[in-house]
Image (cartoon, rainbow, N blue to C red):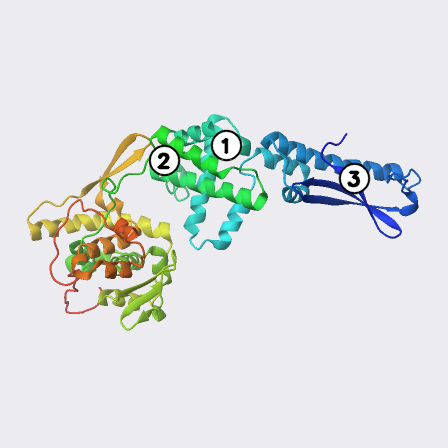
Amino acid sequence: MHSYTQVHLVRRKTYAYVVVYYSKNGEKFRHFTGIKVLSRNITSKGAISTAHPGYEEDMKKIKALQDRVEDLVLSYKEKYGEKPSAQWLEKQFDQPLVEARKNLSDALCYWKEFIADKQQVTRNPGTIKRYNNLEGTLAGFKKKKNCKVSFDLLDQKFFNDFLSYMVNEHEYVRNSKSAKPENALRPEVGLSNETAIKRLKDFTEYLKYCSVEHDIAVNLEKIKKYIKLARHKQEVRPLSKTQKWELTLTVDEIQFVVNLSHHEPVFWQSLTENQKRYLDILLFMCLQGTAPIDTKAIRQTDIRAGRIVKDRSKSGNEFKVELDPIAEDILIRNGYNLDFTDQTLNSELKHMFVTIFELYRRHHEKTHQEPYEILCTQKMKKGDREILKLQHKGLFVELMTGRRSFLTNLGEKADELGIKELMSQAGHTVIGTTLGYIHERQQAQKNKGGLFGIRKLEQPDDRML
């Protein structure tokens, strides 16, 4: 007996075609069985007569299709406690039955479709990598806990357990693709609170996609409530602005790097052309404040009347900033092309700046008559645990160091520039966003002179060696 579907004969002038019919809330699902019945072979009660040619074979075919629809409806109802929408049934019916059943028991069943959808609208490849990190984290959770993750199990207990796993047990290796197998890197254990929170936001975004595009019965308001309570229970909170520290370069440090060939000619000569280009890219961001993705896109046509005028890739907001003469030389020297690979550039900058900061230390201590702090401490939280990372200053250098340095140095001049000019040069429309880039120094010097006071020292041959 079929509880949710019916067999309908849709009549035409001399025949009727057979469909399997299902409905919910006025929405109708009709699937043509491929069978047509002549009018004379339809009984007075509207059934197919045994006089219909191939009667038994066609009746088996009709039953098989009706059983499949019933099976899908019943599977969905067992999972979610209600019948599926007609739209969901139409999408699932076109898939093989085994795959349709799997979709109801695997919460990541639409992951490939989700990623394909994001690739159509996401500009930054790093965003896709971040989404895929979520898939890896969920896979690690399922393996560690020996459990499945299905749509009907996304309750408070799941989010409590998943969040606890992320900050306390998840193992990962940074730059695992570039690591050589023989090095046998030991994995780090536990994600930072900020990373765990991003994972949960990405998971919520994926569930929203499943709800909108595939009619999966997911209550997003409940999901958000579960996440909020799980974060409270596990004490997963991001570091406050006063606790969070990220490296910024002082004006004096930037000037030293700009004039590296003058201060340390032997070291400068030891650098490859690619390494010199990487330093150029970082210096450009320090002097102009462009984000990495915008730096890659800078072209000669973006320079108007001595200014860089461009829309930010992230927000679409326009930013206008005076083109620094040194930054202009960098553009000319590199043919107005500052494209790069993020991971390679980050890695090379760390290697170079371990040496550069050691060389700068001698210069700083001689000039300022005070010790230079070469070791820096960065605080991190994993759940309620506080972790301190103490390492060489050079190892904290990364792509975003350039933009943070620009805005921090600019922020120290805010009284001269005015906050509106500061926001304009940053390409922000909300003051809180601008202030979020301005960081406390672990060691700072007051600057004298112009905006930054950076200058190019004259040399007999006014070209880089």
Dot 2, crowdedness within 10 Å: few (<14), some or many (≥20)?
many
Residue located beneath label 2 in the image: 191
User: Considering the image in quadrants, where does the N terminus appear?
Assistant: top right
Q: Is residue 211 above or below residue 296?
A: above
Residue located beneath label 1 in the image: 154
Circle 2: element type: loop
Tell me residue 177's x, y (percent): 42, 43
Q: Is residue 194 above or below residue 121?
A: above
The answer to which of marks 2 and 3 sits earlier in the sequence is 3
The answer to which of marks 1 and 3 sits earlier in the sequence is 3
In the drawing, does residue 237 fall left or right of residue 461?
right
Can the viewer see residue 38?
yes
State the residue in front, 386 or 14.
14
At label 3, which amino acid type do we have? Val
Circle 1: element type: loop
Residue located beneath label 3 in the image: 7
Spatial CA distance of label 1 from label 2 is 21 Å
Numbered badge on residue 102: none
